[in-house]
Image: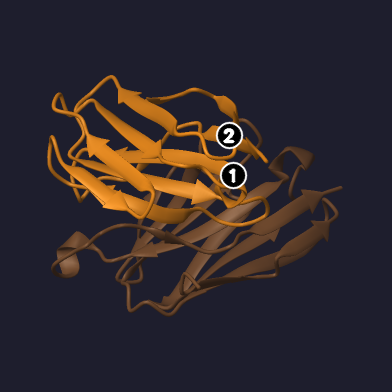
Chain colours: A brown, B orange
Amino acid sequence: ETGVTQTPRHLVMGMTNKKSLKCEQHLGHNAMYWYKQSAKKPLELMFVYSLEERVENNSVPSRFSPECPNSSHLFLHLHTLQPEDSALYLCASSQDWMAGPGPYEQYFGPGTRLTVT
Amino acid sequence: GQQLNQSPQSMFIQEGEDVSMNCTSSSIFNTWLWYKQDPGEGPVLLIALYKAGELTSNGRLTAQFGITRKDSFLNISASIPSDVGIYFCAGSVNNTDKLIFGTGTRLQVFP
């Protein structure tokens, strides 16, 4: 409904695994975001891509590696994660202010529930 | 860094009651957004506010952009069971800035 899809919806992985999360937006936006949502914490912004360039990396550990091949797709590659990385990972998209008129509200996907064992 | 304080943290109300929640900031924001998150889903945008004093409605929901630019309010009238969820406020200083999210208000509605 929101125009932003995420796969998989649930993922269980061991600490030595490598996996990827995928996000796709069908809203014609040109900025995409990865957020981490842990219990009882505000949403934490991880990465921002604008016009396919990474414009923000909020001190995220290198075991999280984003990729934005085009304005509609965003990936988060995961490797050697820790149990404390278990959380809901949310993708969002918006118009970017540098690319033209707004509105600039962010629209979220349903999230990937990640459990690291 | 900037923080948004959202209150109350949780509310337990009876169906049909009106609900009020608010969000306050230590600094001035020029955009306020209100989202609702259902269990196991991502946040869904409810209302966007861009002008101080602005009052905007979306069905039974009404949100206001505080005159001081440091707060915003969300009201839900005549609550129904599907209003259950977590309500988040989010703000930004300007359109070029990232959104800062509040900690959420968890709403439970009893029939």
Label disc, if present, on residue B85 of the rendered structure: 1
Between B110 and A72, the residue placed more toward the observer is B110
Q: Residue at x 61, y 33 (%)?
A: B14
Q: Residue at x 79, y 41 (%)?
A: A83
In which quadrant of the rendered image does the C terminus of chain B lie? top right
Mark 1 vs mark 2, CA separation in Å: 6 Å
What's the amino acid at mark 1? Answer: Gly
The residue singled out by tag 2 in the image is B106
What's the amino acid at mark 2? Answer: Arg
Q: Secondary structure at mark 2?
A: strand
Q: Residue at x 49, y 22 (%)?
A: B8
- The image position of residue A84, as x and y in percent, is 73, 38
In this rendering, the answer to whether B72 lies above or below A99 is above
Discs 1, 2: same chain:
yes
Q: Is residue A61 visible?
A: no
Q: Please give left or right for residue A20 compared with residue A44 in the image.
A: right
Earlier-in-chain disc, 1 versus 2: 1
Q: Please give left or right for residue B1 compared with residue B35 in the image.
A: left
Disc 2 crowd rating (10 Å Cα; few below 14, some 14-19, many 20+) is some
Between B22 and B13, the residue placed more toward the observer is B13
Chain ID, mark 1: B
Disc 1 crowd rating (10 Å Cα; few below 14, some 14-19, many 20+) is some
* Residues marked 1 and 2 touching at CB (< 8 Å): yes
Q: Secondary structure at mark 1?
A: strand
- The image position of residue A26, as x and y in percent, is 43, 80
